[in-house]
């Protein structure tokens, strides 16, 4: 059993971290931390922990010798300091995306985990959707031929309400770009290779958002982003993401489409159909292909996955982290993948500002 401390027990931590750890049968939660002391206490009670295992300062949780691994589910501006402190305390780290506000921060995090020799993972959760796992295998088996183009669209309809830290650049880094497009950049890099140059355009269509009590809060991050990416080796990609696509629905509704075109065939993924892909050969039509059972199975020795596909892939993300800790192997995706995505996000931000294409640095 791996003993976990949860740092930041907001929505994502409770849903994707705590629940998956408990479901796995391979991990237990021994401490929680949240700046909101009431929330920390409530979560500790829900996990059956004594009140003294509910911390409001992450440094105190890291002093807890029983904690072997931490999940970091705080707002983005806190990830770097917490990851670095956790690594220095010898804890394995699963950090939420986007891992950092900029590339310099992200590189400092990578250096800290490497120096400490701990396991490190970025929560690019959608890599674990069965259809995305299968899509990567189809590409790697060469079934699409030489890869030429990717196209990613993540379109949802969220109301114009106050998003809290998410709409403040100093806390979030960016808006839809880091929040949703970061997942797709990661997936694209995992199949196409590194992004080397980008050209982006960003918009903030709703600069004032309304809180529950009617107050108005300003937003300075993108609520629509689009960019063209050039990958090493010559392939290209087109990405778009927004939560202002009226009528498209929230969350796992909406459009989440990712397609790849190779010299021999095309393949298309939709989050709405996580257990199938559409694949079409040159001269043919796009046909539905079921995802084989092996891509719907738990990673490592994890317990059988939940029947709800929206929960199952989040469980598999945690199984990957636990399995890597138990086996002493690298996590996939690791913090290195998180740094590479941060570098691409930074380049899109600079490109949108300058109106010019921007090179993405090579990060090893
Ligand atoms: N991988 C995914 O699919 C996915 C989905 C949603 C969110 N996320 C990421 O998860 C992270 C959290 O998002 P969320 O939606 O859960 O946000 P949230 O606001 O619901 O939760 C953040 C929590 O962190 C706590 N916190 C703030 N400062 C803290 C501190 N100094 N120490 C400890 N706790 C502190 C807050 O009180 C809050 O409870 C973000 O990085 C977000 O981008 C990832």
Image: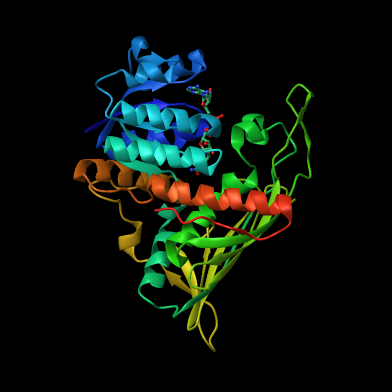
Splitting the image into 4 quarters, where does residue 222 fall?
Answer: top right
Q: Nearer the viewer, residue 90 or 291?
A: 90
Q: Horizontal and vertical percent for residue 258?
A: 55, 63
Splitting the image into 4 quarters, where does residue 201 fall?
Answer: bottom right
Residue 314 horizontal side relative to residue 221, left or right = left
Residue 274 visible to an observer of this rendering: no
Q: Horizontal and vertical percent for residue 238?
A: 62, 65
Q: Is residue 79 above or below residue 237?
A: above
| Figure colour scheme | rainbow
Residue farthest toward the top in the current orientation of the protein: 52
Q: Quadrant of the N terminus?
A: top left
Residue at 36% in and 47% down? 316
Residue at 39% in and 31% down? 84
Residue at 25% in and 41% down? 325
Q: Is residue 284 above or below residue 88?
A: below
Residue 33 horizontal side relative to residue 299, left or right = right
User: How many numbered markers are drawn?
Assistant: 0
Q: Nearer the viewer, residue 233 or 296?
A: 233
Q: Horizontal and vertical percent for residue 121?
A: 37, 43
Residue 313 visible to an observer of this rendering: yes
Residue 152 horizontal side relative to residue 216, left or right = left
Q: Nearer the viewer, residue 270 or 171?
A: 171
Residue at 40% in and 45% down? 335
Q: Is residue 364 above or below residue 21?
A: below
Q: Horizontal and vertical percent for residue 324?
A: 26, 45
Residue farthest toward the bottom in the current orientation of the protein: 283
């Amino acid at each position: 059993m791996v003993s976990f401390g949860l740092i930041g027990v907001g929505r994502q931590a409770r849903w994707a971290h705590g629940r998956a750890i408990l479901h796995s049968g391979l991990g237990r939660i021994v401490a929680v931390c949240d700046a909101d002391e009431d929330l920390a206490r409530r979560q500790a009670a829900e996990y059956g922990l004594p009140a003294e295992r509910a911390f409001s300062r992450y440094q105190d949780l890291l002093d807890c010798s029983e904690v072997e691994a931490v999940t970091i589910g705080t707002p983005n501006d806190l990830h770097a300091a917490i990851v670095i402190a956790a690594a220095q305390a010898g804890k394995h780290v699963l950090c939420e995306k986007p891992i950092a506000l900029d590339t310099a921060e992200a590189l400092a995090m990578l250096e800290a985990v490497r120096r400490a020799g701990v396991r490190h993972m970025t929560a690019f959760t959608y890599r674990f959707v069965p259809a995305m796992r299968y899509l990567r295998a189809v590409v790697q088996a060469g079934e699409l031929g030489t890869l030429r183009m990717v196209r990613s669209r993540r379109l949802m309809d969220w109301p114009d309400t106050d998003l809290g830290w998410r709409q403040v650049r100093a806390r979030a880094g960016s808006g839809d770009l880091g929040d949703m497009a970061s997942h797709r950049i990661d997936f694209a890099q995992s199949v196409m290779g590194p992004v080397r140059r980008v050209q982006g355009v960003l918009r903030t269509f709703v600069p004032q958002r309304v809180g529950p009590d009617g107050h108005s809060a300003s937003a300075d991050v993108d609520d629509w982003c689009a960019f063209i990416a050039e990958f090493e080796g010559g392939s290209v990609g087109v990405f778009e993401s927004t939560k202002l696509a009226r009528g498209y629905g929230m969350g796992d509704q909406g459009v989440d489409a990712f397609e790849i075109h190779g010299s021999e065939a095309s393949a298309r993924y939709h989050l709405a159909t996580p257990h199938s892909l559409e694949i079409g050969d040159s001269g043919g039509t796009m046909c539905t292909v079921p995802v084989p059972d092996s891509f719907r199975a738990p990673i490592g020795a994890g317990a059988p996955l939940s029947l709800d596909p929206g929960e199952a892939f989040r469980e598999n993300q945690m199984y990957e982290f636990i399995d890597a800790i138990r086996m002493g192997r690298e996590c996939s995706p690791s913090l290195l993948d998180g740094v590479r995505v941060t570098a691409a996000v930074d380049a899109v931000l600079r490109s949108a500002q300058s109106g010019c294409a921007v090179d993405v640095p090579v990060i090893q």
